[in-house]
Image (cartoon, rainbow, N blue to C red):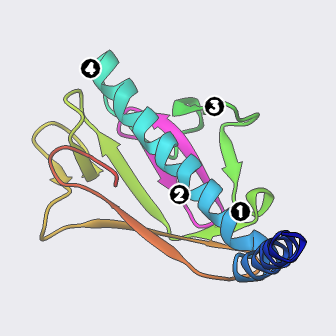
């Protein structure tokens, strides 16, 4: 009986060591930040639908931010995201890098890559997909996710 318990303890300790070496902290950090970014994009979509206005998220490769209306670079239109301290979220402070993108959501929650007016816009589509790549610093395993055309769903 003691031999069985000893063997199980040794197998358990070995499994913990192996698992900790397989998963790096940078991968888990990237995964957590990726989830936060997805939630921020979902927040922009929900706010657009709730208010019936254009809202979105823009990333310039160094920062990302929530905005309202069709002018994401206008400081007056930049809004502080939930759980953040500033309107612009610095990627360096989150230890991640991300591709530059802009996503607009109309009052129905439909995603666009460009939006000047209800008539002049570029919806996300199969021909015009929106893919966002997130990686940790230092670089590890990058992850790419997309915004689904028409519904704005983010898997």
**Left or right, 110 with reference to 142:** left
Mark 4, residues whose alpha carbon is within 10 Å: few (<14), some, or many (≥20)? some
- In front: 62, or 1? 1
Mark with earlier residue (4, 1):
1
Q: Main secondary structure of the magenta part?
A: strand
The alpha-carbon separation of the residues under discs 1 and 2 comes to 19 Å
Question: At which x and y percent is residue 134?
Answer: 55, 69
Number of the label disc, if any, that sits on residue 52? 4
Mark with earlier residue (4, 2):
4
Q: Residue furthest front?
A: 1
Mark with earlier residue (3, 2):
2
In the image, the segment drawn in magenta is 57-71
Q: Mark 4–mark 2 contact, CB under 8 Å?
A: no
Residue ID for mark 3? 80
- In front: 117, or 31? 31
Task: Report if residue 106 lies within the magenta region.
Answer: no
């Amino acid at each position: 009986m003691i031999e069985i318990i000893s063997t199980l303890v040794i197998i358990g300790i070995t499994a913990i060591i192996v698992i900790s070496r397989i998963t790096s902290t940078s991968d888990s950090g990237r995964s957590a930040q990726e989830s936060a970014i997805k939630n921020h994009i979902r927040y922009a979509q929900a706010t657009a639908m709730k208010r019936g206005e254009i809202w979105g998220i823009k990333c310039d490769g160094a920062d990302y931010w929530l905005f309202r209306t069709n002018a994401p670079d206008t400081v007056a239109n930049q809004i502080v995201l939930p759980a953040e301290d500033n309107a612009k979220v610095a990627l360096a402070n989150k230890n991640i890098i991300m591709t530059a993108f802009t996503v607009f959501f109309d009052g129905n929650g439909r995603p666009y890559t460009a939006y000047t007016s209800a008539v002049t816009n570029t919806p996300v589509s199969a021909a015009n997909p929106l893919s966002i790549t997130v990686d940790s610093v230092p670089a590890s395993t990058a992850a790419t996710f997309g915004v689904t055309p028409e519904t704005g769903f983010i898997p």
